[in-house]
Image (cartoon, rainbow, N blue to C red):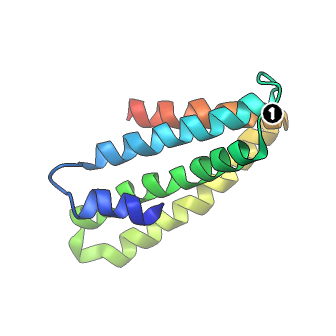
Amino acid sequence: MILISGLFISFWKNKFPPWVVLLIGSLACFSGYGVLWLAVSRTVQSLPYWSLCLALCVAANSNAWFSTAVLVTNMRNFPLSRGTVAGILKGYVGLSAAVFTEIYSVLLHSSSSNLLLFLALGIPMLCYLL
């Protein structure tokens, strides 16, 4: 998936700006985690395993679209500090994992269904707002 998002933002730079890549990532995040939430919350009674695997693949790879848009945009904006910018941005990935852990345990009361709903709605809404 990261190759596809890289092709979107690099080769077709004039046709697909970074906000389009973020939009694709947020749609993949919403659809992937949304289907998983439907299955975990038992809103939909029975989904085949192949559809759950496909939804998990789409949801997990939505991060590739986000990171590609952010990384390429900042590499273009700061060409003389590419190493520092890449290090800071990749450091935020670890920091966001710690933040998600705290949100999961404190705000969502360790509920996997609430976490999937947060991932399906929260991250895409944040992308749309920004």
Residue 115 in the image, given as x and y percentages of width and height: 73, 36
Q: Total number of numbered labels?
A: 1
- Quarter placement of the C terminus: top left
Left or right relative to 13: residue 95: right
Task: Residue 88: name its quadrant.
Answer: bottom left
Residue 110 in the image, given as x and y percentages of width and height: 85, 38
Q: Tell which of 4 and 116 is nearer to you.
A: 4
Q: Tell which of 120 and 55 is nearer to you.
A: 55
Name which residue type carries label 1.
Val
Query: Can residue 67 be seen in this snapshot?
Result: yes
Left or right relative to 9: residue 129: right
- Residue at 78 percent across and 46 percent down: it is 49
Residue 17 in the image, given as x and y percentages of width and height: 23, 48
- Residue at 31 percent across and 74 percent down: it is 82
Residue farthest to the top? 43
Residue 106 in the image, given as x and y percentages of width and height: 79, 37
Q: Above or below — where is 21 with respect to 103?
A: below
Q: Above or below — where is 120 with respect to 85?
A: above
Task: Residue 36: name its quadrant.
Answer: top right
Left or right relative to 48: residue 56: left
- Residue at 50 percent across and 35 percent down: it is 124
Q: Above or below — where is 60 with respect to 72?
A: above
Query: Can residue 71 be seen in this snapshot?
Result: no
Which residue is under mark 1?
A: 40
Q: Tell which of 67 and 40 is nearer to you.
A: 40
Q: Tell which of 47 and 74 is nearer to you.
A: 47
- For label 1, the SS is helix
Q: Residues within 10 Å of mark 1 (few under 14, many from 20)?
A: some
